[in-house]
Amino acid sequence: MSDTQLPDDGFHPFESPPPEPDAGPFRPLQDIWLAPRATIRRLVDYDPGYMVIPLVMLAGIAEALGRASSRDSGDEMSLFLIILLALIGGPLSGLISVWASSHLLLFTGRWMDGVATRDHLRTAVAWSAVPAVAVLGLTMLEIVIFGDELFRSVTPRLDASPGLGILIFLFALVEGALSIWSVVILAKTVAEVQGFSSAWKGLGNVVMSALVILAPLVALFTLIALLAKLG
């Protein structure tokens, strides 16, 4: 059996990591869907930085467009401006999100005897965003089909066409399923890099990380509400 030289742990965003000896072809963008633990293990063992930056930037764009649609941003700005702002702000928010998430997962994971490094957690978070990248593809298709009504509260063309109404419902259904699957992948990739045998423990790590942010905010808003009533 020949020796395999491991590369350093630096970022190599577009250079594909070599497969393990006798492990067969490595297709992480495909394998992450149904074999997230095995896929993330090979990624962190050979190149934790592989595709991290492109994935989180694309996921950030998808999230920005989704936010614009849910807030009916088209009532106040043009479709061009919505897309432009998503292309500018989305990648930045994606990078900030993966940076913050990896630190929070590292911090709360230590309470659960997790062993992952920050770089490996960053990889786990980034690769769980592959379904979000698929959502971005669907959103682009929706923009082509529905135009600016995707981002408006008033949708005369959609309201006048039952077919378009059914179609946009199906898009929403698929996107919802992809969002749920992204959480499943995240629980499994976090569990793998943290050394947890159960994906439920990985999910617990994710939930605890969210609570670290949400609990102080809820307490603050509750205090403000109480003070407002007393005042």
Image (cartoon, rainbow, N blue to C red):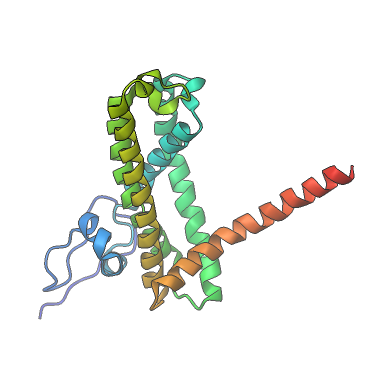
Residue at image coords 51%, 32%: 71
The residue lying furthest to the right in this view is 231
> Residue most toward the bottom?
1
Occupied quadrant, residue 25: bottom left
User: Where is 81 relative to 17, above or below?
Assistant: above
Residue at the image position 28 percent from the left and 28 percent from the top: 163
Q: Describe residue 210's horizontal placement relative to residue 229 as left or right.
A: left
Pick whichever, 213 or 141, lies toward us: 141
Identify which residue is drawn at 38% across, 23% down. Answer: 159
From what the image shows, is residue 15 above or below residue 157?
A: below
Which residue corresponds to the image point at 45% horizontal and 75% vertical from the top-left? 115
Q: For the C terminus, which image quadrant?
A: top right
- Percent across and percent down for residue 227 are 84, 47
Q: Nearer the viewer, residue 15 or 101?
A: 101
User: Quadrant where the N terminus lies?
Assistant: bottom left
* Residue 97 x/y as whole percent: 48, 50
Q: Is residue 222 left or right of residue 86?
A: right
218 to the left or right of 27: right
Q: Nearer the viewer, residue 175 or 123?
A: 175
How many marks are shown on the rendered structure? 0
Q: Is residue 198 above or below residue 159?
A: below
Residue 186 position by quadrant? bottom left
Q: Position of residue 76 (x, y in %)?
A: 52, 20
Q: In the rendered image, is residue 212 in sight?
A: yes
Residue 16 visible in the shown view = no
Residue 142 appears at what percent x and percent y?
Answer: 31, 31
Residue 113 lies left or right of residue 211; in this view the side is left
